[in-house]
């Protein structure tokens, strides 16, 4: 993809089901602990976690790359998306309509979609992130292979990262 993922930070409990309307994409509400438990449950497969927000244009532009990755490797890669749209105002469920609409528009049904139930600033601290977009990739043994974010991309790539970069790492991890 030509455009990179330049960072943006949207304005600022356990996993619970957020029932989807008929035909809508399923989205789970998760706190940091249940997010990490979800990653651990996928051990034995490569795991890709895309942290994003509907208010982040680079996130929205590149997110279809995660959908494409999920479609290309349904048996060997677990693709997760974590929306950081909840800014602490109101309830996390208030952010669900916009998140579901976006996920439905990009066809993210094959991705395990989550919305942070903790306010975005708290999740940023727990994930040690300055901004989204960010993509974490874990090896099948459960160890973190890499994390793509603005700082890493500037240091290692000299440019914003794209899903082509993510796909290259996943491809390496899937080689026998």
Image (cartoon, rainbow, N blue to C red):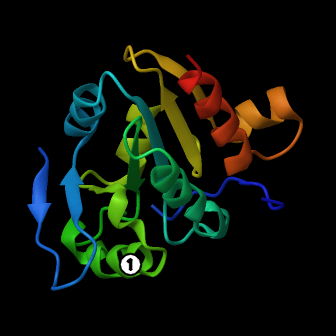
Q: Residue furthest right?
A: 158
Left or right of 12, for residue 167? right
User: Where does the image place residue 162, in percent across and percent down from the top left?
Assistant: 72, 49
Q: Kindly indicate the quadrant of the structure image that contains residue 49.
A: top left
Q: Quadrant of the C terminus?
A: top right
Q: Kindly indicate the quadrant of the structure image that contains residue 19.
A: bottom left
User: Where does the image place residue 170, in percent across and percent down from the top left?
Assistant: 58, 32
Total of numbered circles in the picture?
A: 1
Q: Quadrant of the N terminus?
A: bottom right
Give me the residue at 41% from left, 20% from top.
140
Pointer 1 residue: 104
How many neighbours does mark 1 have within 10 angstroms: few (below 14), some (14-19), or many (20 or more)?
Answer: some
Left or right of 62, for residue 164? right
Q: Kindly indicate the quadrant of the structure image that contains residue 39.
A: top left
Q: Nearer the viewer, residue 71 or 156?
A: 71
User: Where does the image place residue 104, in percent across and percent down from the top left?
Assistant: 38, 78
Helix, strand or loop at mark 1: helix
Q: Residue furthest bottom?
A: 22
Left or right of 144, for residue 37? left
Residue 130 appearing in the image: yes
Q: Is residue 26 above or below residue 82?
A: below
Q: Nearer the viewer, residue 59 or 77?
A: 77
Give me the residue at 37% from left, 80% from top.
98
Give me the residue at 20% from left, 58% from top.
28
User: Where does the image place residue 60, in percent across and percent down from the top left?
Assistant: 58, 69
Give me the residue at 57% from left, 64% from top.
64
Residue 91 appearing in the image: no
């Amino acid at each position: 993809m030509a455009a990179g993922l330049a960072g943006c930070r949207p304005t600022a409990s356990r996993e619970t089901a957020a029932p989807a309307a008929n035909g809508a994409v399923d989205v789970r509400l998760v706190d940091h602990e249940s997010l990490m438990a979800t990653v651990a449950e996928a051990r034995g497969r490569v795991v890709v976690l895309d942290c994003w927000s509907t208010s982040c244009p680079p996130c929205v532009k590149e997110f279809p790359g995660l959908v494409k990755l999920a479609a290309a490797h349904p048996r060997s890669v677990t693709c997760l998306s974590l929306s950081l749209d909840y800014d602490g105002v109101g309830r996390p469920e208030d952010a669900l309509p916009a998140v579901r609409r976006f996920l439905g528009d990009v066809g993210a049904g094959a991705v395990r979609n989550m919305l942070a139930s903790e306010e975005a600033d708290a999740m940023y601290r727990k994930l040690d992130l300055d901004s989204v977009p960010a993509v974490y990739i874990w090896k099948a043994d459960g160890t973190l292979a890499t994390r793509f974010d603005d700082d890493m991309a500037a240091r290692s790539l000299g440019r914003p990262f794209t899903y082509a970069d993510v796909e290259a790492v996943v491809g390496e991890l899937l080689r026998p």
